[in-house]
Image (cartoon, rainbow, N blue to C red):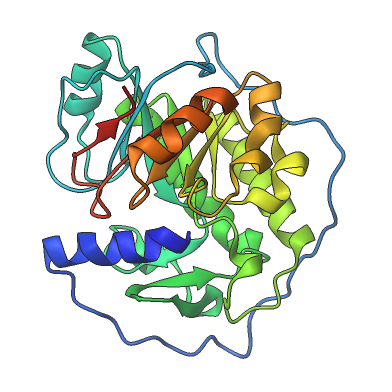
Amino acid sequence: MRALVTLLAAAAALVGATPATPATPAASAAPVARAGASTRAPVPCAGRHCWHPEVGDTFFWQLAGTVRAGRRATIYDIDSETTPRATVAALHRHKRKVVCYISGGSFEEYRGDASAFPTAVLGEQLDGWPDERWLDIRQLHILAPIMRARMAACRAKGFDGIEFDNVDGYTQKSGFDITAADQLRYNRWLADEAHRHGLAAGLKNDPDQVTALVRWFDFAVVEQCFQYSECAKYTPFIRAYKPVFDAEYVTPLRTFCVPARRLRIEAARYPLALNGAQSRCP
């Protein structure tokens, strides 16, 4: 999340996004449902051809610009809304698996479904990103149909999995009293719903809850874990034979490639704009 603020700001500059004025969350929000950490089993992936990425898979991440086909990667992680079904189909013809990026924990005013979010669930702006605001993830009765619709759209386009971004709001200045237990409940719900839609579920940047979430998620996407010495927190994924994909933005390849191989983390260097450039370890 820390790098995504800068990352999205850079992407917004590329597309000319217009900053939005934050609104104050409504005082008369609907009753909030709280839940502790569930110990139930995760929902298994639905369908006959559910995909489970593996440790050793290669990864390419692009959220801005025309998708660059032909990368030497077994997995493409690209934007859910701006990517047409034809692009997903073309990548499948080249034997790639395709992950759709959606924000599970923030409101983006430029998205096609922005009008579906009531003011009651909109919190503080993400630092450095005026077009994006934290969601009150405790109000699942409001967010559930919106997120289900997004997942269904990913499935309809032929995506194989979902990367859920901004799922660490409990550590941020969201404007809401979100607890770690609230975050676990929501993140597990996201993973379960992805599986019900026949999609692999990817966790994004929630290192302190990895142990409690690894059973639910099929892979992890992280940012700058070598720069901030957080990569070891994701070893439960590797031990469970679930891959970890790391994006570094400023750390030189020579600094993280050797430890990435030792930890069995698939790491590469990207520009903050995530516009299709990538430097891979030799």
Viewer-nearest residue: 263 or 70: 263
- Where does residue 22 sit, x and y in percent of width and height? 39, 86
Q: Quadrant of residue 279?
A: top left
Q: Count numbered badges in the picture.
A: 0
Asked if residue 213 is positioned above or below residue 110 in the image, the reply reads above
Asked if residue 261 is positioned above or below residue 118 in the image, the reply reads above
Q: Is residue 275 left or right of residue 100?
A: left
- Where does residue 64 sit, x and y in percent of width and height? 20, 48
Q: Quadrant of residue 112?
A: bottom left
- Where does residue 121 sit, x and y in percent of width and height? 55, 73
Viewer-nearest residue: 162 or 156: 162
Q: Is residue 81 visible?
A: yes
- Where does residue 205 sit, x and y in percent of width and height? 55, 50
Viewer-nearest residue: 82 or 11: 11
> Which residue occupies 31% across, 16% down?
96
Q: Is residue 68 left or right of residue 263?
A: left
Q: Is residue 153 visible?
A: no
> Which residue occupies 59% across, 72% down?
172
> Which residue occupies 87% across, 40% down?
39
Q: Is residue 194 left or right of residue 96?
A: right
> Which residue occupies 84% across, 45% down?
38
* Quadrant of the image containing the C terminus: top left
Viewer-nearest residue: 252 or 168: 252
Asked if residue 46 is positioned above or below residue 7 in the image, the reply reads above
Q: Quadrant of residue 94?
A: top left
